[in-house]
Amino acid sequence: MSKPLVSPYITPEGHERLREELSYLWKVKRPRVTQAVAEAAAMGDRSENAEYLYGKKQLRQIDSRIHFLSKRLKEQIVVDRTPGDTSKIFFGAWVELEDGEGNMQRYRIVGPDEFDPGKGYISIDSPMAKALLGRTEGDEVVVRKPGGAATFVVTVIRYGSSEVPGDEE
């Protein structure tokens, strides 16, 4: 059996966001676009009807996303518990790192469907997350980057869905 290209893991929050997106697309957006396409089709010649052509394109995109989400949600494994050893970095951990110049960086290891650099969410499949898994506070971590290797020291490990380490729910 071949290994999947992306990890199936997801946080409960990420899983809920994808379920909400699927529901919105299926129950709200698709019916609206379908209605708009029907109205545009009623106007006559479809070959030169921009609203009709655009609507059909939108429907294909929506249907493609619905198909993807339906399949992906079935494949996912929701990780909804804290690991037994919270002194180590595992899926769902918030991690603070210090680089050689004393700069601090904060990341949360999440599933590939939740990757969001703006929030500091990194995919468990990323080189950074792979280098961090299993590490403890005080460990030095070397991460291979396109520009060369970078070294960090793990300063904080926390668990919980809060966006600020230490503010667990």
Image (cartoon, grey):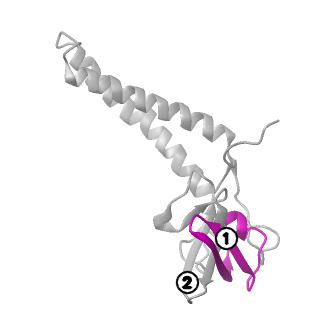
Give the residue at x 61% y 79%.
96
Outermost residue toward the left in this view: 43
Specify whether 95 is left or right of 2. Answer: left
State which tag comes first along the sequence, 1 or 2: 2
User: Which mark is drawn over residue 62?
Assistant: none
In this rendering, the answer to whether 100 lies above or below 75 is below
Amino acid type, residue under disc 2 in the picture: Met
Q: Is residue 48 left or right of residue 67?
A: left
- Based on the displayed image, in which of its 4 quarters is residue 92 positioned? bottom right
Q: Position of residue 121 (x, y in %)?
A: 55, 64
Q: Secondary structure at mark 2?
A: strand
The extreme front residue here reads 148
| Image coords of residue 134 (percent x, y) | 79, 70
Tell me the quarter of the image containing the N terminus.
Answer: top right
164 or 114, which is in the foreground?
114
* Above or below: residue 4 compared with residue 27: below
List the residue tagged with mark 2: 104
Q: Nearer the viewer, residue 112 or 62?
A: 112
**Residue 3 is covered by the magenta coloring:** no
Q: How many marks?
A: 2
Amino acid at circle 1: Val
Q: Residue furthest bottom?
A: 102
Which disc is residue 143 wearing?
Answer: 1
Quarter of the image that includes the C terminus? bottom right
| Residue 56 located left or right of residue 159 | left
Question: Residue at horizontal 74%, vertical 86%?
Answer: 138
What residue range appears in magenta?
Answer: 129-158
Tell me the quarter of the picture where residue 146 sits.
Answer: bottom right
For image coordinates 37% across by 35% down, the residue present is 29
Residue 47: image quadrant is top left
Q: Nearer the viewer, residue 125 or 60?
A: 125
